[in-house]
Amino acid sequence: MYADTRPIAPSRFAAALKDLSIGMLHLKVLEIRNSIVHLQYSNDQLRPFAEGSATAVDAPASSTAGPDQDCVDAIRENEQVIDRMAERIALVRAEVEDRGMSWAEFQSKDEAKEEAEGADADADAETPPQHSAWTDGTFQTGTIRDGQVHLDSQPGRPSANGDANAAAGGSLSDEQLRRALEEQMRNLGNDDDNDEGEGGMHL
C-alpha cells in the first residue's frame, strides 16, 4: 500500500514538530491515530484471507482455501507503517513534554484508562502486604525532637504490667516513656554481658 512512498526520517519529523503550535500538535496526533485505526481495520479485513480461512468471491469453485500471499504481504506492510506511526506519536509526546506540558491532554480515553490500570497494577506489585506487627503495637514509630521522643499514633496492645493508659491506646505518656528509657539505659551495661542476645534498647 505504501511501498512507493518513502517515509520521512524520525529526525526530520522531530525537527518539523518544533515549528508547530500546541493546537497543530493536537491535530497531528489525531491524524496519526486516525491512520492507525484505518490500517488496523484493513488488517482485520485481510486477516481471514491471509490465514486461508476465507477465499475471494471471484475465486474458482475448485480452488481450495489457502493463505493469500498478497494479503499476508499487505498485513506485514501495514504493521510496519503502524509501528512508524506509533514512533511518531512518541516523538510528538517528547516534544510536548519538552515544552513543559502534560501529555495527559493528548491521550485518548483508552490510553488514559490503560495507563491508569498499569499504574494501579504497578502499585499493587510494589506494595507488599503490611505485617500485623506494624499495626498491633509490636512495633512503634516516631520522631525525636528537642530531645523528646514523640511516638506516632497507632493502634496498640496492652502493656505487660496492665497499665491503664497503655491498655487504652497502646502508647506511653511522656513521663512513662521517660522512666522506661532511663531504666533501659541503666540496664544497657548489664545487657552487654547477657549471652541470650536480648541486648539493646527496646521501646
Image (tube, helix red, strand yellow):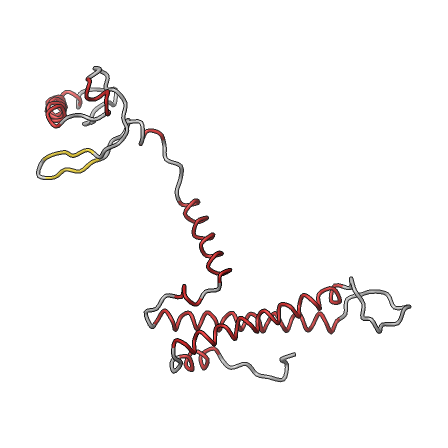
Q: Residue furthest left?
A: 146
Q: Quadrant of the C terminus?
A: top left
In the image, 176: left or right of 28?
left
The residue depicted at 80 percent of the width and 70 percent of the height is 56
Residues 186 and 56: in front is 56
Q: Quadrant of residue 91?
A: bottom left
Is 102 on the left or on the right of 64, as rendered?
left
Q: In this image, 84 relative to 139: left or right?
A: right
- Which quadrant of the figure contains the N terminus? bottom right
Q: Nearer the viewer, residue 115 or 184?
A: 115
Instruction: Determine the residue located farthest toward the top in the rendered image.
Output: 161
Relative vertical location of residue 138 with respect to residue 40 in this rendering, above or below: above
Q: Tag count in the figure?
A: 0
Residue 67 position, x and y percent, is: 77, 66
Q: Is residue 3 above or below residue 106?
A: below
Q: Could you say where residue 8 lies in the image, as x and y percent from the top left?
A: 51, 82
- Residue at x-position 51% and y-position 60%: 110
Residue 170 locus on image (x, y percent): 24, 24
**Depth check: 89 or 77 in front?**
89
User: Which image quarter: residue 125?
Assistant: top left
Give the percent coordinates (x, y) of residue 108. 48, 64
34 sits to left or right of 122? right
